[in-house]
Amino acid sequence: MNIAIFGGSFDPPHVGHVNIIRQCLKTLDITKFIVVVAYQNRLKKTCRFQAEKRLLWMQALLQNIAQEIALTQSPSILCSDYEVKRQKPIPTIETIKYFKELYQPQKIYCVIGEDNLTTLDKWVQFNELISLVEFVVIHRNHVAQPHCFNDMPLKLRYLPHTCDISSTTIMQNFVLHQTNIPLCIREYIQYEYNRIN
């Protein structure tokens, strides 16, 4: 069994996330695709939306994707509440170890945006982390690849990013960018956005 883990704040979830998930399901040789909603990103001070809301939105979004692919022999997809339930920022290494013990996979892919490469060597227990996973890096045109990994046994696999949108861009002008939020969850996010603004 091979698994892929895609962690993030998903603050809010958007079509870029959907495209990444679909691309991984199509491209990677995996049995299970796991989306892990972070309670709080360790590198960001706050999230705009509560962790429980972001988790519910991602669960609804993944249910929608699962229904779309139900007739194919795609990997199973699930949304994990592992980090949200712990109510604190969790280092990636802990999440990886949790799923490694739970599923005993032969291979673990860790899906990250290319912008994460610039700080990857600062992640908690980085050397152990790179021994446990192969990173699937979602390429972004505006991000320069760091050269600090040349002498490390780091496994990187690149996939192109097909939708250059971010949660930050959406929240900077919600009215303009709300069409980048999937229809199945747009109304809920719109309601929550209006409530807090």
Image (cartoon, rainbow, N blue to C red):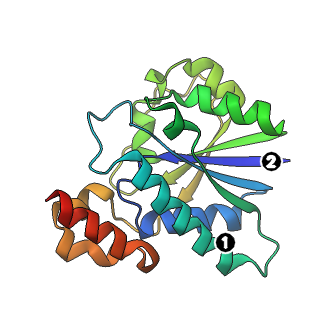
The reply to whether residue 9 is in sight is yes
What's under tag 2, amino acid-wise? Asn
Identify the secondary structure beneath mark 2. strand
Hey, which quadrant is residue 166 in on the image? bottom left
Sequence-earlier tag: 2 or 1? 2
**In screen coordinates, is 22 left or right of 53?**
right
What's under tag 1, amino acid-wise? Ala
Hey, which quadrant is residue 88 in on the image? top left
Q: Which residue is found at the position 66% from the left and 56% from the top?
A: 78
Q: Residues within 10 Å of mark 1 (few under 14, many from 20)?
A: some
Residue 37: percent from the left, percent from the top? 50, 47
Task: Using the image, determine if residue 64 lies above or below residue 95.
Answer: below
How many discs mark residues in the rendered view?
Answer: 2
Q: Which residue is found at the position 74% from the left and 48% from the top?
A: 3
Q: Gap between marks 2 and 1, in whole Å?
A: 18 Å
Q: Which residue is mark 1?
A: 66
Q: Which residue is found at the position 31% from the left and 79% from the top?
A: 179
Q: Which residue is mark 2?
A: 2
Residue 32: percent from the left, percent from the top? 75, 54
Task: Using the image, determine if residue 61 lies above or below residue 67.
Answer: above
**In screen coordinates, is 54 left or right of 175?**
right
**In screen coordinates, is 59 left or right of 16?**
right
- Location of the C terminus (image quadrant): bottom left
